[in-house]
Amino acid sequence: MKLDHSSITEINNYLDLLYNQLPALENSQDELHRFWCRSYDRDIANMSLSMGLFLLHPAFHKRMDGTNIELKHQGDFSGKQKEGLMVNKCQIGILVEDAVCAGTKTVSDHNWPRSLGGPTRGANHLELCGACNGAKSNSILLFNWKQDITDVEWIGELLRDICGARGGCN
Ligand SMILES: [Zn+2]
């Protein structure tokens, strides 16, 4: 697999935010809040995909006083959510173009990792066989970085929820 240049740029931006910016912000709710509000744009088309995804990191699922925000669509896929989504064929081909896997015994996986704020809902749900699920784990490298931020409808929804729960940005 060779990623195109724009995908590599987005991945590098995300990793920079995760490993350089976040540790510098995490000790202060004040700093964290200022960064969030400075970076968030209500018109999400003005943000890069990497920034949009970063702003829904669990580190930001907090109010100014440090208490946790309960967001919709977090946690594990329930049996009910899986009904209708359940397939008996590994969907690795959604992540890696033209990849074919014969695995039929699948487990539910989050396309954008749950540990990084990926929601538990249909549009972020994948059925992968055990081997492909293990290989993907929490990796962000198989995410489709070529799509437009506005194509991932849960990003805007979640960011609006986080913004509201954090008390908004003025
Ligand atoms: Zn598979």
Image: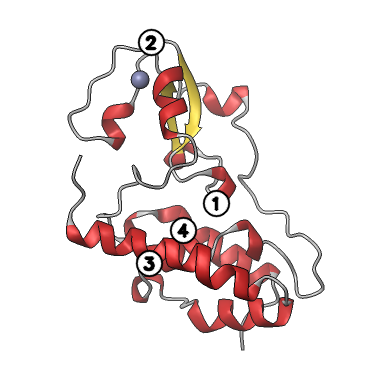
Q: Amino acid at mark 3?
A: Asn
Label 2, on which residue?
104
Answer with mark 3 or mark 1, whichever residue precedes in sequence: 3
Mark number displayed over residue 155: 4
Q: Is there a contact, CB below 8 Å, between mark 3 and mark 4?
A: no
Of tags 2 and 3, which is closer to the observer?
Answer: 3
Residue in the foreground of this view, choosing between 31 and 150: 31
- Give the residue type that dot 1 points to: Leu
Q: Which residue is pictured at 61% across the width and 89% down the height?
A: 170
Q: Which mark is residue 13?
A: 3
For label 1, the residue is 116
Tell me the CA gap for discs 2 and 4. 30 Å
Q: Residues within 10 Å of mark 4 (few under 14, many from 20)?
A: many
| Callout 3: SS | helix
Task: List x then y, in percent, for residue 95.
Answer: 30, 36
Residue type of the residue flagged with mark 4: Ile
